[in-house]
Amino acid sequence: MDKMVKKYNAFAILDHWVLALSCIVLAVQGFGFLFHIESVGSFFGGFESMRMWHNYLGIAFSVSLLCSLFLFLKESLTFDADDIGWIKVLGGYLSHKVTVPPMGKVNTGQKFYFLGLVVFGAGIVGSGLVLWLMADNKIYVMYSHLIHNISFVMLMILVPAHMYLGSLANPGTFRLMIYGTAPYWWAKKVSPKWISEVEKEHKA
Amino acid sequence: MARMGILVSPELCIGCRACQVACKSWNQLPGDKTINRGGFENPPDLTPHLYNRIHYLEVPSEKDATRWLFLNQRCMHCDDAGCMKICPAPGALYRTKEGAVGTNKDKCIGCKLCAVGCPFNVPRYDEKDKISKCHLCFDRIANGLQPACTKTCPTGALKYGDRDGLIAAAGKVGYGKLYGQSDLGGLGALYAFKDAPKLYGMNEKPAIPETVVFWHKVLKPLSFIGLGGVVAASLVHYVAFGPHKIKEEEEVRKDG
């Protein structure tokens, strides 16, 4: 058995699952509304009932998104020279041969992804609340409808890319979502700066 | 079936409001409690229980102290209907075979987006937040009858019939181009205005809000093009570059 290192605690794992599942279901419902997909509507008990599900699942999404701020925001706003190096080699995503600068707990792409998620997540949550609670104000609803859909388009680009990179493209990452742990040698290779921090703490 | 429509001739209207009453009668709509506002116009705006109404306008006149205009306000049954575009619930707003925009309260989800899509400020919502507006008496016209309002109009200010026929008939009595003849793909309610539509408080160039058009033309297709694009790109990436495998052996060798 490999020596394991704990990267995410139970709270982070649970939060990510709530965020991920609510996001997927909300997106499916969103496509149902956008393109009048009767089968999606029927699955949720008709479109009126789907609207209710959409609203309440939106709360699960917003709460888990809010929690994720405490987990990832600080890290995602910290950039250094290695991040510029990462961008220069495009994170090694387009070639496995290039040397990628040493990364911390998350890499530069993941930082950008999280910031995008926060911006468009806030957009979709805020506008969603207006559409739900202030439906009588036509001007508010008009702009909220626009913001809701712009955010939806952006999230539908960001989220599937994140899903692919966090599973098929990088074997070994998906177990983090379930156990929160990774083999020590693997983490040392993927997140060397974070591992050295962990080692320092361990010694202290 | 040929597209049917209503020709509104404000010059023939005497402001009796029989159309309002007939509509309420056929559609079994309760009366609205209103207040005396010192005029004949009542209620002051369309309500969830008032699908059409006569708008009384007093405008300056050369001959008399004032001139009265009577404008029948209702759903215009646009060909390019903003309400139908934006509606997320299939079947809540639908096109009847006569070309009207029908409503189905059972399918309405009460999101009130149609009010945003409408260029004429028509949709209203009942106690259950369901869409409430003129549906051109879809139940009557489907059975070969005419809508309650046109049936009852004593002066012919409201005429129901074949839309092209109505346009031709208005042309014969001297109306060149009707209001709504080509706006928004052609309105189902055509107005034979003697003066500029602005005098009647009507928008010269009615249009669906730009945000709604942008959403419909750009964002809607982009949502699945974006998703499909990322899925396709992921597949190509997987085939072209393959998964990024990290080998333990190398590590061991380096450590050693």
Image (cartoon, rainbow, N blue to C red):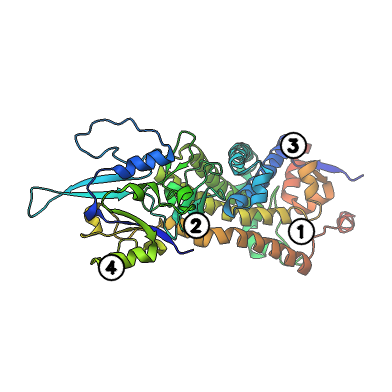
Name above or below for residue A20 compared with residue B203: above
User: Marks 4 and 2, Cα distance to the nearest angstrom?
Assistant: 38 Å
- Expressed as whole percent of the image width and height from the top left, the position of residue B43 reads 30, 37
Mark 4 in CB contact with mark 2 (< 8 angstroms): no
Task: Indicate the secondary structure of the residue bearing disc 2.
Answer: helix
Give the residue pinned by disc 2. Answer: B215
Same subunit: marks 3 and 4: no
Residue depicted at x 62% and y 59%: B224
Residue drawn at x 75%, y 51% is A192
Label 2 or label 1, whichever lies nearer to me, is 2
Depth-wise, is mark 3 or mark 4 nearer the camera?
4
User: Marks 2 and 1, Cα distance to the nearest angstrom?
Assistant: 33 Å
The answer for how far apart the CA atoms under marks 1 and 3 are is: 24 Å
Q: Which residue is mark 1?
A: A169
- Which residue is drawn at the image coordinates 71% and 66% (left, top)? A94
- Provide the residue designation for mark 3: A9
Of badges 2 and 3, nearer the viewer stands 2
Label of residue B171 in the image: 4
Q: Is residue B43 above or below residue A37?
A: above
Q: Position of residue B75 (x, y in %)?
A: 39, 50
- The kind of residue tagged 4 is Gly
Label 2 in the same subunit as label 1: no
- Subunit that carries the residue with mark 3: A
